[in-house]
Image (cartoon, grey):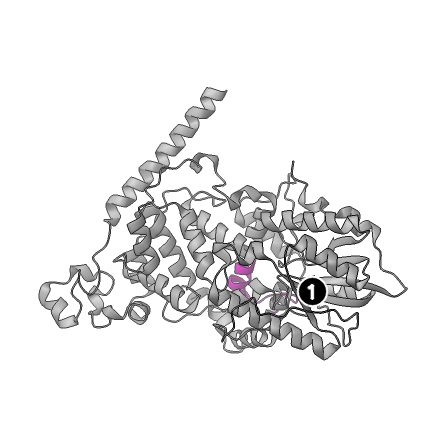
Amino acid sequence: MDVPYSARYASARATIPHVSTEATTVLWFRRDLRVDDHPALERASSRGGVVALWVADPALLGASHHRAPKRLRFLRGCLEALDAVLADRGIRLVVRSGDPADVVSAVAREAGADLVVATDDVTPYSRRRDAAVAEALTADGVAFEPVGGPWRVPPGDLAGSKGYGYLVFTPFWRAWDQVPVAARIAPPDQLHGPTLPSEGLGMLPAGEPPIAAGPDAARGRLEEFIRSGAVDRYGDDRDVLAEDGTSHLSADLRMGVLSPAQVGRAIGAADGLRASRVPFWRQLAWRDFYAHHMARHPEIAEGALKPAYRAMQWDDDPALLAAWREGRTGFPLCDAGMRQMRETGWMHNRARMVAASVLVKDLLVDWRHGEAEFMRRLVDGDPANNNGGWQWTAGTGTDAAPYFRVFNPVLQAKRFDPTGAYVRRWVPELAGVPDRFIHEPWRMDDATQAEAGCVIGRDYPAPVVDHALRRDEAIARYKDADARYAERLGAAA
C-alpha cells in the first residue's frame, strides 16, 4: 500500500536537525534550477558546506516522452545559468549521469555528507526514484530529506474536509487562495563545500534554447508581463489566439527557474490581489491542483481516474493519429496549434484544448496518445499538468462537467480567432483564404479556391471526419462505457 504523501520521509526529517557544527549537505537539484527563494538551498547552506548536484537520469532522458529536443535544450540552458550563479557564490554544479540511487549515494560518500536534500516531487516515477535513493543513502548512514516543492502549497497541506484532498477545482481554489504567500527566501551570498569532479552537460543537446533560459530570463518575462499590463488584461485576453495575452512563464515554472511564490509576490498576491489579476492567479492554482491530484492518485499517470472509462472503446486509427500529429486534420485551428507546437515547442492554451478535443472526441483516439505527443514536443511539458489537462478534455479525470462537453473546432475558431490571424500564421497555405471561409475552407467553391491559391484536397485537406457525426459517436461510446461499468458493479454486488 502506498505511503500517505504527508508521511513520506518523516523519519529522515526527524533525525537530521539543523546543526551548529560544520556539516556537508548534498543539494540534489531537480525541478528547482535557481538559488533565489529556494527552501532546500536554505536548509543545506544553513548547515555548512554544500555540494550542488544534478543527475542525468537515463530512465528519464531515455524515455520517449522525455526526449523532447527543445525542452532538453531549454533544460541545458537553465543548468548552465544555474552553474554560473553558483560559481558567483563560490561553488560549481556537479553533473553526474546514472541511476540516481547509485549516483546520489556515491556523491554523498565522496563529499562526506550526512544529509541529502532535494525539492520534492509527486510523479509516480519520482516517488519510486526517491524511495530507492533514500534506501541507498540509509545503508550508508546518510539521511534523505525532501524540502519544499515545485508548487505553491504542498499537497499535504490541503487535505479537504475529509482528509482526502479535492477532486473538484472550485473548492480547491477557495482553500488554496486562503493560504498566505510565503515570504521570500533570499539566496546566500557565499557558498562553500568540497570540490568534486563533474561530467559536464554533454549528454544534453547543445544549441540555442527555444526561449531564453535561466532565472534572469524568467524574471524578465515576469516583469514584462506585469509592466505591459498583460497580467491585468489576462482575464479578457488569455483566450484570444492572435493577441497571445498569456504569460509564457509555464516553461520557467516547469524547470523551477521561477517559483510560484515569486510570481505571487510579484503580482501582489501577498498584499491583497487586485481583482484584475485574480484570473491569472487562478491559473497557478490549477497548476497546484493537478500536482496535488497526482500526489494522491498516482494511478492517473497510467489511465483514467474514472473507472468507467478505463475500458473505453477507441479506434486509435494510425492514419488519423498521424494527421493530427502533423497538423493536417482539415480543422484549421487544430492544425495551427499542432504546427505551432512542432515548430516552437509551445502551444496556446486555447489551441491545446481544441486540439485535444479533436483527437479524443472527433478522431476517437485514446487521450494517452495525445498526452504523450504533448510531452514529446512541449518545452513546458509537465507530467501532472499535462495529464490533468488531457483527462479534463477527455472527461475521464477530476472535472465536474460530464463527458458530453465536446469542443466544436469551427465555433471555437470563430470565437477566439475571428479574423483568422492565428490560423494564417501557422497554416500558411490558408493565407489567401477569405475571412468568411478561413475556419471552414472546404466550403469555398472552385473559383474561390483558385483565387485563394488553396485547392482543398491538394493544398490543404478537407476535414478527415465529420464533426457532428463523430461527436454523436463519441457520446454514445461514453454512455456505453458507463452502462458496462454499471453492469460490472451490479454483478459484483
- Residue extending furthest toward the right: 21
As drawn, is 17 to the left or to the right of 146? right
Question: Residue 123: where, in percent of width, then height?
Answer: 59, 50
The type of residue carrying mark 1 is Leu
Q: Up-down: is 431 above or below 61?
A: below
Q: Compare residues 405 and 424 and report the one nearer the observer.
A: 424
Confirm whether residue 276 shows in the render. Answer: no
Q: Compare residues 485 and 164 and report the one nearer the observer.
A: 485
The answer to which quarter of the image holds residue 419 is: bottom left
Does the segment drawn in magenta span residue 279? yes
Does the segment drawn in magenta span residue 432? no
- Residue extending furthest toward the left: 447
The answer to which quarter of the image holds residue 339 is: bottom left
Span of residues in magenta: 268-284
Location of mark 1 (residue): 53
Q: Compare residues 304 and 198 and report the one nearer the observer.
A: 198
Q: Give the residue at x 41% y 46%.
A: 394
Question: Residue 363: where, in percent of width, then height?
Answer: 31, 48
Q: Compare residues 170 and 355 and report the one nearer the observer.
A: 355
Dot 1: element: strand
Q: Give the residue at x 31% y 36%.
A: 476
Q: Give the residue at x 76% y 52%.
A: 137
Question: Residue 6: where, in percent of width, then height?
Answer: 70, 46
As drawn, is 30 to the left or to the right of 210? right
Dot 1, how many residues are within 10 Å of its Cα: few (below 14), some (14-19), or many (20+)? many
As drawn, is 308 to the left or to the right of 8? left
Confirm whether residue 184 shows in the render. Answer: yes
Task: Give the mark count.
Answer: 1
Question: What is the quadrant of the N terminus in the image?
Answer: top right
Question: Residue 53: where, in percent of width, then height?
Answer: 69, 65
